[in-house]
Image (spheres, rainbow, N blue to C red):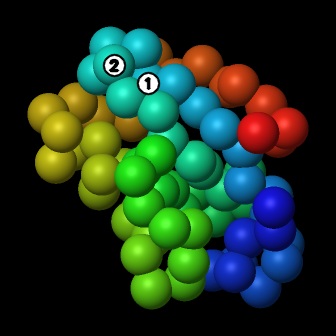
Amino acid sequence: MICQRCNGQGEIYKAKVKNLGITLYICDECEACWDEDSNIELSTFQDLSTFLEQKGTSYNDADIEDLGYNW
């Protein structure tokens, strides 16, 4: 899926944040993210760093596993 936030510059991949036990969808270009319960739309994204900080971790401390683009 192509990211709407960065005007098609990036693709969205599925990822697991292991230390938080959550699944996200993340743009490989602009790092917009959506949790697994959100519709992937321009109006519903959050910046990955902001999302992680709200969950009590930082981008550097997050254990993110890339699950690929075929979801």
Question: What amino acid is at disc 1?
Answer: Val
For the residue pair 5 and 49, the one nearer the viewer reads as 5
Question: What amino acid is at disc 2?
Answer: Gly
In the image, taking residue 14 as reference, residue 48 lies left or right, namely left
- Rounded to the nearest angstrom, the CA distance separating label 1 from label 2 is 6 Å
Q: Position of residue 49 (x, y in %)?
A: 37, 50
Residue 17 shows which numbered tag?
1
Quarter of the image where one finds residue 20: top left
For the residue pair 71 and 3, the one nearer the viewer reads as 71
**Residue labelled with disc 2:** 21
22 versus 70 height, above or below: above
In the image, taking residue 59 as reference, residue 56 lies left or right, namely left
Q: Quadrant of the N terminus?
A: bottom right
For the residue pair 36 and 29, the one nearer the viewer reads as 36
Q: Nearer the viewer, mark 1 or mark 2?
A: 2
Q: Is residue 36 visible?
A: yes
Q: Position of residue 65 (x, y in %)?
A: 60, 19
Q: Could you say whether the residue bearing mark 1 is in a helix, strand or loop?
A: strand
Q: Is residue 61 visible?
A: no
Q: Are marks 1 and 2 in contact (CB under 8 Å)?
A: yes
Tell me what residue is drawn at x 29 percent, y 34 percent: 58
Tell me what residue is drawn at x 72 percent, y 44 percent: 13
Q: Quadrant of the C terminus?
A: top right
59 versus 8 height, above or below: above
Q: Could you say whether the residue bearing mark 2 is in a helix, strand or loop?
A: loop
Tell me what residue is drawn at x 40 percent, y 52 percent: 37
52 versus 11 height, above or below: above
Mark 2 Cα within 10 Å, few/some/many (few <14, many 20+)? Answer: few
Q: Position of residue 4 (x, y in %)?
A: 69, 80
Tell me what residue is drawn at x 39 percent, y 35 percent: 59
Mark 1 Cα within 10 Å, few/some/many (few <14, many 20+)? Answer: some
Q: Position of residue 2 (x, y in %)?
A: 81, 68
